[in-house]
Image: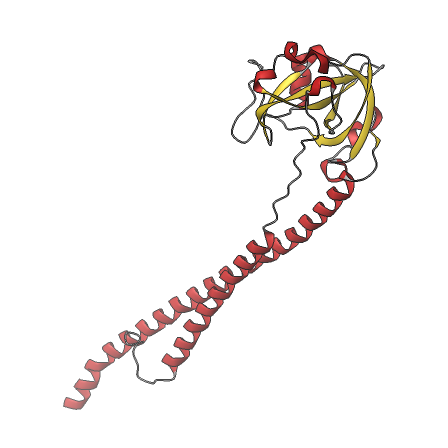
Amino acid sequence: MTVTKGRRQRHPQAHAEKSERQRYRVKRAIFAVCLVLLAAALAALGTWQVERLAWKRDLIVRVDQRVHAAPVPAPARPDWNKINAADDEYRRVTVSGTLANDKETLVYASTALGPGYWVMTPLTFVDGSSILINRGFVPTDRRDPASRREGEVSGPVEITGLIRMTEPKGSLLQSNGVAADRWYSRDVAAIAEKRGVGAVAPYFIDADAAANPGGLPVGGLTVIDFPNNHLVYAITWYGLAAMVLALLVFILRGENGDRGQPGRSSRSG
């Protein structure tokens, strides 16, 4: 009777320990699954960065080819709806028309020559349509057109430069103050509306470095710089994935060690 009573007393404790071990193993299994999912997500991010690296390298090659190619006629009005950044931005073009100097707009600029403004002037055609031309940079103390009259060219002109895409709403730090005529980005549609320009191309042209009378505005200051850190990012994501997998292996080895020691409770594991 005494032995039977002792066995009956130990059964609840053994059952509790078994339940505790099972709960512990379930938690470890859930944690391991989470680690697998996390490693997969990190690896996917690394793969995405590898794809971005290939895209960025291709973009750099294409833009370099466009910038150094012989100029072609700028897209005419019937082709304006086909213009897009992937196919056309930084394409070297030439265009002829008449500058509407009375409708120029100054857009704040920070350049290698210091702070100042881009001079955005509509180039008009005989059909009444226009393309905004970024004629180049003027320093702050020469923002007044009266201080650079020689550069206010009249009559037909031919301009060579690079196609650029419109920059709507403003810069990263500043929104355009349309009502106050303060501009921080070259928003083609907003500038054209503000200046009463009719049909206008959905792009603008950065004029090249050909000298303007009087030396201002200074063209040819387009910055073509594509940060390419995708390889570093890819290595980082793959490295984090490898660390997570190493932690998973450590956990699985610990689990196997626990199983290989009969009678070892989860508390000692």
Q: Residue at x 46, y 62 (%)?
A: 34
- Picture coordinates of residue 64 (x, y %)? 74, 43
Q: Vertically, is 64 above or below 145?
A: below
Q: Vertically, is 137 above or below 42?
A: above
Q: Residue at x 64, y 41 (%)?
A: 225
Quarter of the image where the N terminus is located:
bottom left
- Picture coordinates of residue 190 (x, y %)? 65, 19
Q: Nearer the viewer, residue 264 or 41?
A: 41
- Picture coordinates of residue 248 (x, y %)? 45, 69
Count of picture labels:
0
Q: Nearer the viewer, residue 106 or 26?
A: 106
Asked if one can make out residue 1 in the rendered structure from this viewpoint, the answer is no
Q: Nearer the viewer, residue 253 or 188?
A: 188
Q: Residue furthest left?
A: 2
> For this view, does 2 lie left or right of residue 109?
left
Q: Vertically, is 219 above or below 153?
A: below
Its colouring scheme is: secondary structure
Quarter of the image where the C terminus is located:
bottom left
> For this view, does 152 lie left or right of residue 169?
right
Asked if one can make out residue 240 in the rendered structure from this viewpoint, the answer is yes
Q: Residue at x 84, y 26 (%)?
A: 78
Q: Nearer the viewer, residue 77 or 155?
A: 155
> For this view, does 226 lie left or right of residue 247?
right
Image quarter of residue 136: top right
Image quarter of residue 121: top right
- Picture coordinates of residue 153 (x, y %)? 76, 14
